[in-house]
């Protein structure tokens, strides 16, 4: 516990000594000597979880009462008095504080820093009078809503007219789920795309709501919230649904957070940050697409919302339901070991079949002719022409936006590198720019080679823009659409593009992984992965897992309409048709894929069989960053049971003129790794003050990529 000595001449210096001492969580600089809890004096005891304002240095900052009784104050040290108490709000409950304390400890961040970062920013600006008004307004609105004769929610699980009948698999899953909840194990709902996972979420939520609980639903992306929100709103009229994600205005976010915290919202639906929503009656957490990397925060406290959801469920006695067609290997291993209950939905609703997977061996195709480029295999093109003739849609997946990944001069071998990063700048033909996708550095495309003046500089490789252009020549009568991060920049653009696909205004849709997720395209009967091979040989050990999930998910876009399912196809253009990943994909065999990947991970000592943390450092030079990491490795030497690997540069080592280095820390035991990090990380701040060339450093526990 740290003391804030009274500053001489402070206005409250003469205040009465009596009263009580409180430990308050405040936002202090990360890894500073102050652990995030500071002692303050209050006239009367305040319950833990109370929000208030406290003086810190010359500032007035928000804080949360953490402990009622603090350690004894040494003689001669006078504590500063707390400021305004935000009594308009009930205290944040113990379960919430436990979650935050666990997350701060596990992910090696300051307690106060994390606690205040996950609250709505608007809370900092409002005084208690303003908060009282906000709360009263919410209560008035709620009262008005309950007075109007809206249909009351059906507390009994009798099928209403709008509820679809359950498939036998869904019914069995729901029964099993009730038992899993009783055993307080998390449940993996493993269901192929189109198998009706959402209906299981809805029915489970219905049970939780009927029991008086609040329900938290986490989704990986904001884009997917409107669809799901609409389904929950339709199913539970009269229930209050609050969404929490980064696209809300500050005022909306505060309002929705208050609805959750005050217990008014029955359902809270949101992206990863919503795992920290304060919900006094929490009874169920659903994590949809639990394998999605978006659940891992990539800056600040690098938490996994999926993992925290599991922890929170256990702490609060709330059921946890993790849904996926291609579960993360971590979750799969838990299910295999019996730590999670596994429920399977193997059949698509309506009896639709999964699309037939056709592997095209690009290595045996005849050469397209001198100077010609093979875009699509002849068989694939023919299959697309047939769809076009029948009025069906095709989806081409290419996970690279822009026109071409690099421009190249044939005369002097110049390439369009970024002057600030160790990466190529991507050629965007539509606006004639070279753009760095790492630092954003953008320039007009040069007319001639900047090195030798050669006019003949050419793009190498292919991105979505180029594929779209090539398709207009290959299929001249087709209407070609494109959805990627460039085409959907701007409010409402993605919705417009999706609406055009749904309305049948697009015959062939070209897209990045953005289009593979969740969207329910009824008329797509052909999905093709144009060039997916690179992930097979990536240095990132999770690349095959992500590729398999992406292809399964993309394939799931085809044949959502049962009538067309039988004729639906997924094409994969590959130079490695014998690869085990594609063989498993062809059989829609996630189990085999997961087993082979887990065997590889076990042999290589990778998660889930080992636990990892990355120490990253950034400096003006790679030497400065490396020296810091080497010194950190020396500090770590005394910890047993943990292996510290030599510092290495990440795949893209320089971004925006900053050199990056990273060092892997590994242990077969999660507990040993946690013990080591807790002892090691506080010393790194002192180390950094010696290594002046280090601009930033951070610890990433359970990193997604190494
Ligand atoms: Zn040149
Ligand atoms: Zn750059």
Image (spheres, rainbow, N blue to C red):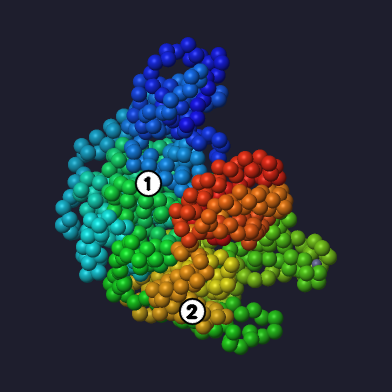
Residue drawn where x is 36% and y is 53% of the image = 310
Q: Residue furthest right?
A: 452
Q: Is residue 628 left or right of residue 409?
A: left
Residue drawn where x is 18% and y is 50% of the image = 154
Tag of residue 580: 2
Residue 168 appears at what percent x and percent y?
22, 70
Residue 307: tell me if it is visible.
yes
Residue drawn where x is 34% and y is 77% of the image = 353
Nearer to me, 267 or 371? 267
Q: Is residue 381 left or right of residue 41?
A: right
Residue 380: tell me if it is visible.
no
The quadrant in which the C terminus is found is bottom right
Whether disc 2's CB lies below 8 Å from ligand 2 is answered: no
Tell me how many marks there are: 2
Nearer to me, 232 or 94? 94
Secondary structure of the residue carrying numbered label 2: helix
- Measure the C-alpha gap from mark 2 to mark 1: 41 Å
- Above or below — where is 357 with respect to 200? below
The residue indicated by pointer 1 is 243
Tag of residue 212: none
Which image quadrant is residue 327 in?
Answer: bottom left
């Amino acid at each position: 516990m740290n003391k804030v000595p009274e500053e001489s001449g402070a206005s409250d210096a003469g205040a009465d000594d009596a009263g009580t001492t409180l430990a308050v969580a405040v936002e202090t600089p990360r890894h500073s000597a102050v652990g995030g809890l500071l002692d303050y004096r209050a006239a009367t005891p305040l319950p833990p979880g109370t929000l208030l304002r406290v003086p810190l240095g010359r500032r007035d900052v928000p804080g949360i009462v953490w402990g009622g009784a603090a350690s004894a104050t040494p003689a001669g040290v006078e504590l500063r008095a707390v400021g305004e108490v935000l009594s308009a709000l009930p205290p944040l409950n113990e379960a919430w504080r436990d979650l935050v304390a666990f997350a701060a400890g596990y992910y090696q961040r300051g307690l106060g820093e994390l606690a205040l970062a996950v609250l709505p920013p608007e809370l900092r600006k409002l005084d208690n009078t303003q908060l009282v008004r906000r709360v009263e307004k919410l209560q008035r609105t709620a009262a008005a809503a309950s007075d109007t004769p809206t249909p009351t929610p059906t507390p009994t699980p009798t099928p209403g007219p709008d509820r679809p009948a359950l498939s036998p698999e869904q019914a069995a899953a729901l029964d099993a789920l009730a038992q899993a909840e009783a055993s307080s194990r998390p449940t993996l709902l493993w269901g192929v795309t189109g198998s009706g996972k959402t209906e299981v979420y809805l029915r489970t939520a219905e049970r939780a709501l009927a029991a008086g609980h609040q329900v938290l639903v986490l989704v990986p992306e904001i884009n997917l919230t409107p669809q799901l929100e609409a389904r929950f709103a339709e199913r539970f009229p009269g229930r209050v649904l609050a969404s929490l994600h980064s696209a809300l205005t500050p005022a909306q976010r505060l309002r929705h957070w208050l609805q959750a915290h005050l217990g008014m919202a029955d359902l809270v639906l949101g992206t990863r940050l919503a795992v920290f929503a304060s919900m006094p009656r929490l009874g169920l957490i659903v994590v949809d697409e639990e394998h999605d990397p978006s659940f891992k925060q990539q800056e600040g406290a690098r938490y996994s919302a999926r993992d925290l959801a599991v922890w929170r469920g256990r702490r609060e006695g709330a059921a946890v339901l993790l849904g996926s067609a291609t579960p993360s290997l971590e979750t799969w291993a838990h299910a295999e070991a019996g730590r999670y209950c596994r429920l399977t939905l193997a059949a698509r609703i309506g009896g639709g079949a999964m699309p037939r997977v056709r592997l095209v061996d690009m290595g045996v195709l005849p050469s397209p002719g001198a100077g010609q480029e093979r875009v699509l295999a002849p068989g694939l093109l023919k299959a697309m022409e047939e769809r076009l003739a029948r009025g069906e849609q095709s989806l081409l997946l290419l996970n690279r936006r822009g026109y071409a990944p690099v421009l190249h001069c044939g005369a002097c071998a110049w390439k369009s590198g970024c002057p600030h990063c160790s990466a190529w700048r991507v050629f965007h033909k539509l606006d004639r720019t070279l753009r760095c996708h790492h630092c954003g550095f953008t320039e007009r495309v040069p007319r001639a080679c900047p090195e030798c003046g050669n006019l003949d500089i050419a793009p190498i490789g292919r991105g979505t823009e180029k594929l779209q252009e090539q398709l207009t020549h290959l299929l001249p009568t087709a209407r070609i659409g494109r959805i990627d991060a460039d085409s959907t920049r701007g409010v409402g653009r993605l919705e417009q593009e999706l609406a055009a696909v749904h309305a049948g205004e697009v015959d062939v849709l070209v897209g990045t992984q953005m289009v593979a997720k969740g969207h329910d395209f009824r008329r797509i009967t052909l999905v093709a992965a144009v060039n997916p091979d690179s992930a097979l040989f990536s240095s990132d050990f999770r690349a095959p897992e992500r590729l398999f999930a992406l292809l399964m998910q993309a394939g799931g876009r085809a044949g959502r309409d049962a009538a067309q399912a039988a004729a639906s196809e997924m094409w994969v253009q590959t130079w490695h048709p014998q690869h085990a990943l594609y063989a498993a994909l062809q059989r829609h065999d996630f189990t085999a894929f997961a087993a082979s990947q887990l065997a590889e991970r076990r042999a290589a000592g990778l998660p889930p069989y080992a636990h990892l943390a990355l120490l990253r450092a950034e400096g003006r030079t790679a030497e400065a960053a490396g020296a810091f990491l080497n010194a950190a490795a020396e500090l770590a030497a005394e910890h047993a049971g943990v292996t510290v690997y030599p510092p290495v540069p990440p795949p893209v080592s320089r971004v925006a003129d900053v050199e990056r280095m990273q060092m892997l820390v590994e242990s077969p035991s999660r507990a040993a790794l946690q013990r080591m990090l807790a002892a090691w990380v506080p010393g790194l701040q002192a180390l950094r003050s010696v290594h002046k060339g280090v601009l930033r450093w951070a610890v990433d526990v359970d990193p997604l990529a190494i």
